[in-house]
Image (cartoon, rainbow, N blue to C red):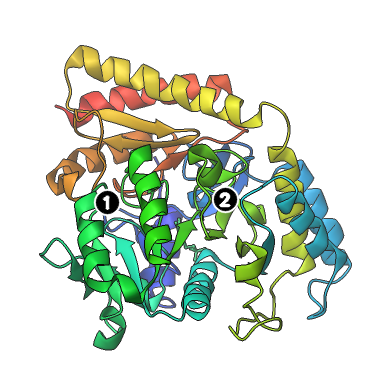
């Protein structure tokens, strides 16, 4: 496979950007080799700068649930941008996207649009603190919530710990307000509340943790979190930046039938353009400025181009059977590859929820905590990754990342992918 053009572009990019990229995982550090520079995408396919074609399962890390450049989104964006891209004044399109969401999602009554998932989480945390008058937040090891200072924190060595920063540049004082515990562990959460409960503003969780493997949680654990938050008058914050509009239109709240106090969205909500949002009960959301005293603002928030993309995409998601069909496609892929691995007795399992899948080099039926992922298994992923690229299959370049099936993936695409994955898996085990 020719890669000279991507190599040239990457060399050039390194003279402009730290590590040659504008977001770290794109640099291919965890799989090695040169990142493919993508020239265009349509449907399930992308083409790199050397003209190589791939079936894409990265899908921009989740936003592209209809595939690349779906006609409805392209048309809506072109029409909107020709009429002006941003006014810094309200537009009807914000109402339209809000109406689409709120009338189909019983878990939130008011919403605010921002421009990224990180911004949504950052604002939601401020809201939780402003509403409760408490300071600490409790998060789970292995959940990612964007690059918010107080959440770039990883667990220390005890059951309940104030974490260590997972980035330079974060003051110790911030870390002291963030408690980190393991997923899937009621005891750790109980201990944290026993010790700090009076000052915990919120528990934040990815209800479908999908940024460090796919760590599907027990429903009982999720209900336990709801109950303990009620008991201590802390808020339960679902970070649904990945799971929102993905595991169903109502996301993980709908999937588990749990009412969180605040929900954050991103990725799919913007139809491939930069949009994030947070929402909740009227009473909580009314703390946000200008109604309340929790300040939050944005120059490009709710801009009509991004709103138009979101409206077009979410309208498509509301078609009947949309999510059932996506899930079916993803099952077709996972079941076939898992069956191949079973016959060959590989330590391997593709984990799935809806149209999200994760490749694990382990036989474990369930992997529920970050600690349960064996870092040594990533060497299998690296081999498999490059074998897949060679066969025209593109995935996110890290074994800790999940893959996404879109509406644009055809039965034929899936069959091609199954063959490629089985071959790549055999190579990884040689
Ligand atoms: C992607 C993601 C974020 C960050 O969103 P950005 O748009 O990249 O800032 C936050 N939380 C979760 C759960 C995510 O998946």
Nearer to the camera, 328 or 388: 328
Find residue 67 and report its horizontal and vertical position in percent.
Answer: 61, 40
78 is higher (above) or lower (below) than 148: above
The residue pinned by badge 2 equals 63
308 is higher (above) or lower (below) than 106: below
Q: CA distance from mark 2 to mark 1?
A: 25 Å
**Disc 2 or disc 1, which is closer to the eye?**
1
Nearer to the camera, 230 or 332: 230
Find residue 19 and report its horizontal and vertical position in percent.
Answer: 34, 71
Q: What is the secondary structure assignment of the residue under circle 1?
A: loop
Find residue 22 and report its horizontal and vertical position in percent.
Answer: 45, 69
Q: What residue sits 64% from the left and 69% below the top?
A: 283
Residue 53 seen in the figure: no
Find residue 281 and report its horizontal and vertical position in percent.
Answer: 63, 62
Most distant residue in the front direction: 231
Q: Badge 1: how crowded within 10 Å, few (<14), some, or many (20+)?
A: many
Nearer to the camera, 328 or 380: 328
Q: What residue sits 30% from the left and 74% below the top?
A: 178
Residue 406 falls left or right of residue 308 = left
Most distant residue in the top direction: 343
Name the quarter where the N terminus is drawn. Answer: top left
Q: How many marks?
A: 2
161 is higher (above) or lower (below) than 330: below
Of pointers 2 and 1, the one earlier in the residue sequence: 2
257 is higher (above) or lower (below) than 262: above
The residue pinned by badge 1 equals 183
Residue 54 falls left or right of residue 142 = right
Residue 139 seen in the figure: yes
Q: Badge 2: how crowded within 10 Å, few (<14), some, or many (20+)?
A: many
């Amino acid at each position: 496979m020719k890669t000279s053009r991507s190599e040239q572009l990457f060399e050039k990019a390194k003279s402009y950007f730290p590590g040659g990229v504008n977001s770290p995982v794109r640099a291919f550090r965890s799989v090695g080799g040169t990142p493919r520079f993508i020239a265009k995408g349509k449907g399930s396919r992308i083409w790199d700068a050397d003209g190589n074609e791939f079936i894409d399962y990265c899908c921009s890390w989740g936003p592209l649930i209809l595939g690349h450049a779906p006609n409805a989104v392209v048309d809506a964006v072109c029409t909107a941008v020709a009429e002006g891209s941003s006014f810094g004044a309200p537009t009807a399109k914000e109402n339209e996207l809000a109406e689409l969401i709120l009338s189909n999602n019983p878990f939130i009554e008011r919403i605010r649009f921002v421009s990224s998932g990180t911004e949504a989480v950052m604002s939601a945390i401020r809201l939780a603190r402003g509403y409760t008058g408490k300071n600490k937040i409790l998060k789970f090891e292995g959940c990612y919530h964007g690059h918010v200072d107080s959440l770039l924190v990883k667990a220390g060595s005890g059951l309940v710990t104030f974490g260590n920063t997972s980035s330079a540049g974060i003051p110790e004082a911030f870390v002291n307000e963030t408690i980190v515990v393991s997923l899937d562990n009621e005891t750790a959460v109980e201990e944290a509340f026993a010790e700090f409960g009076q000052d915990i503003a919120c528990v934040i969780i990815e209800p479908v943790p999908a940024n460090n493997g796919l760590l599907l949680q027990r429903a009982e654990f999720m209900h336990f979190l709801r109950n303990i938050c009620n008991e201590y008058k802390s808020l339960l914050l679902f970070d649904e930046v990945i799971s929102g509009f993905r595991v169903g239109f109502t996301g993980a709240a709908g999937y588990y039938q749990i009412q969180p106090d605040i929900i954050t969205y991103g990725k799919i909500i913007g139809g491939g353009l930069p949009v994030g949002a947070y929402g909740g009960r009227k009473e909580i959301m009314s703390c946000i400025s200008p109604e309340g005293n929790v300040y939050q603002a944005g120059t490009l928030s709710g801009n009509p181009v991004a709103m138009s993309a979101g409206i077009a995409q979410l309208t498509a998601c509301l078609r009947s059977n949309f999510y059932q069909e996506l899930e079916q496609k993803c099952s077709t892929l996972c079941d076939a590859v898992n069956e191949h691995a079973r016959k060959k007795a590989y330590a391997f399992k593709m984990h799935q929820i809806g149209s999200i899948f994760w490749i694990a080099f382990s036989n474990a039926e369930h992997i529920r905590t970050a600690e349960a992922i064996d870092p040594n298994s990533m060497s299998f992923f690296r081999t498999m990754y490059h074998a897949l690229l060679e066969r025209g299959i593109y995935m996110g370049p890290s074994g800790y990342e999940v893959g996404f099936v879109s509406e644009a993936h055809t039965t034929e695409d899936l069959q091609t992918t199954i063959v490629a994955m089985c071959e790549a898996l055999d190579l990884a085990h040689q």
